[in-house]
Image: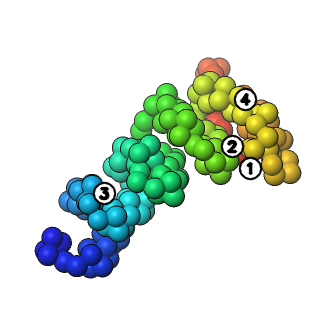
Amino acid sequence: ALDAASVDAKCSILRSLGRLGGDKALATLRAAVKDKDATIQEAAIRSLASWPDAAAIPDLLELAKSGPKDNLKIIALQSYLRLVGLPSPRKAEETFAMYKQAMDLATRPDEKKQVLGGLGQVAHVEALKMAVACLDDKALANAPGQKDRQTTFIYDWGSGSDDTGKGQQKAPKFKGLL
C-alpha cells in the first residue's frame, strides 16, 4: 500500500510510524531512509528521530555520521543522545562508548552539552575524564556559570556512598550538569 501512495501520503504515513514503534515500522523506516526521493528520506529520518525506544540507536548513529543533510545529521545525533540516555541494562562502559561516539560527531556546542549532560548519568571513570577534558572549552562555557556546573558534575561523581551497610564502595551516582 505504501508503494502505491503519493509522496505526500507516504510522508504522512512515515511520520506516524516513528510514534508507533515496532519491528515492521522500523523496517519500513529503514527502507524509506534509502529512498531516492529526498522528501521521503527526510520524513523517514525525522520519524526515526521520534522513535520511542533503543531499537533505532544504530540507525540514528549511522545517520548522524552520514545523513544526507547537515540539519538531518544534527537531528539524528540529538535523537541518538535522547535514546542513549533512556534507562537501559547496558553496562556503564557501553554507554560511555556511545557517548564518546556522539562527542566525536558533535560539531556544535549544543550537542556537546547534551553529551556532557548524558555523561552525568554514567558511573565510569572515562566519563569523568571526558568531562574534565571539556572544562576549558570556551564554546561550552559560554553561559554564565557553565564551568561551575561542570565542576559540580566532577565533584558529584566522587560522592557515591555505600548504602549496603557492608562498607563496600558502590558505583557513584551522577547528578549531571545543571
> Residue at the spot x=72%, y=29% of the render?
132
Look at mark 4 in the image and give the residue it sits on: 132
Label 2 to label 1, Cα distance in Å? Answer: 8 Å
Label 2 to label 3, Cα distance in Å? Answer: 36 Å
Answer with mark 1 or mark 4, whichever residue precedes in sequence. Answer: 4
Q: Quadrant of residue 100?
A: top right
In this rendering, the label closer to the viewer, 1 or 4: 4
Answer with mark 3 or mark 1, whichever residue precedes in sequence. Answer: 3
Place of residue 94 in the rendered image (x, y in percent of width and height, measured from the top left): 45, 31
Mark 4 lies on a secondary structure that is helix
Query: Does the residue at mark 2 contact the one at mark 1 (Cβ under 8 Å)?
Result: yes
Q: Is residue 65 visible?
A: yes
> Residue at the spot x=38%, y=59% of the render?
45
Mark 3 lies on a secondary structure that is helix
In this rendering, the label closer to the viewer, 3 or 4: 3
Answer with mark 4 or mark 2, whichever residue precedes in sequence. Answer: 4
Q: Amino acid at mark 3?
A: Val
Answer with mark 2 or mark 3, whichever residue precedes in sequence. Answer: 3
Q: Amino acid at mark 4?
A: Val
Look at mark 3 in the image and give the residue it sits on: 33
In this rendering, the label closer to the viewer, 4 or 2: 4
Q: Amino acid at mark 2?
A: Lys
Query: Does the residue at mark 2 contact the one at mark 3 (Cβ under 8 Å)?
Result: no
Query: Does the residue at mark 4 contact the one at mark 2 (Cβ under 8 Å)?
Result: no
Q: For label 4, count other residues whose C-alpha is less than 10 Å away and answer few (under 14), some (14-19) or many (20+).
A: some
Asked whether, in this view, residue 83 is left or right of residue 130, the answer is left
Look at mark 2 in the image and give the residue it sits on: 175
Q: Quadrant of residue 175?
A: top right
Look at mark 1 in the image and give the residue it sits on: 178
